[in-house]
Image (cartoon, rainbow, N blue to C red):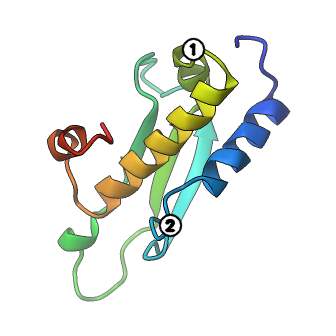
């Protein structure tokens, strides 16, 4: 998997986005998805990150900064056993980070199988 090109990763990412559970992105507003090689701190086990203000913590003004979801390509590739596993792990990671947008914490995500 280490020899996966950026174009191949993008193709797998597109497949993963098509496989997201129905409705999971319906209420997303002002959220961007970024792919980076790895986290700034060099963490090799972090697959994704939500950065923003969860919906339940937002003010009533609606003037929140854009939320961001980061996928860490190198970490996802290193974690995956093969292309199918990579695609599935991207789906899990995106759903996990979107859940943070809705205010669901890691403990609850692990309980319901999206950890």
**Residue 39, x across and y down, in percent:** 48, 28
Of residues 103 and 52, the one drawn nearer to the viewer in this rendering: 103
**Residue 56, x across and y down, in percent:** 20, 72
Q: What element carries label 2?
A: loop
Mark drawn on residue 22: 2
Q: Residues within 10 Å of mark 2 (few under 14, many from 20)?
A: few
Quarter of the figure with residue 6: top right
Of residues 58 and 77, the one drawn nearer to the viewer in this rendering: 77
Of the 4 image quadrants, the one containing the C terminus is top left
Above or below residue 90? Residue 44 is: above
**Residue 24, x across and y down, in percent:** 45, 65
Give the residue number, with chain letter if any, for mark 1: 78
Mark drawn on residue 36: none
**Residue 106, x across and y down, in percent:** 22, 41
Residue that lies at the very extreme toward the bottom in this rendered image: 61
Quarter of the figure with residue 1: top right
User: What's the residue at 46%, 67% (across, down)?
Assistant: 66
User: What's the residue at 23%, 60% (across, down)?
Assistant: 103
Q: Distance between the residues labelled 1 and 2?
A: 28 Å
């Amino acid at each position: 998997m280490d020899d996966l090109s950026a174009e191949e990763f993008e193709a797998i990412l597109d497949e993963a986005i098509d496989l997201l559970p129905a409705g999971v992105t319906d209420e997303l507003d002002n959220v961007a998805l970024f792919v980076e090689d790895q986290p700034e701190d060099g963490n090799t086990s972090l697959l994704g990150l939500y950065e923003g203000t969860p919906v339940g913590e937002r003010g009533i003004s609606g003037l929140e900064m854009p939320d961001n979801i980061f996928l860490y390509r190198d970490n996802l590739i290193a974690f995956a056993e093969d292309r199918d596993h990579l695609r599935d792990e991207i789906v899990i990671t995106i759903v996990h980070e979107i859940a943070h947008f809705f205010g669901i914490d890691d403990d609850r995500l692990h309980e319901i199988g999206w950890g």
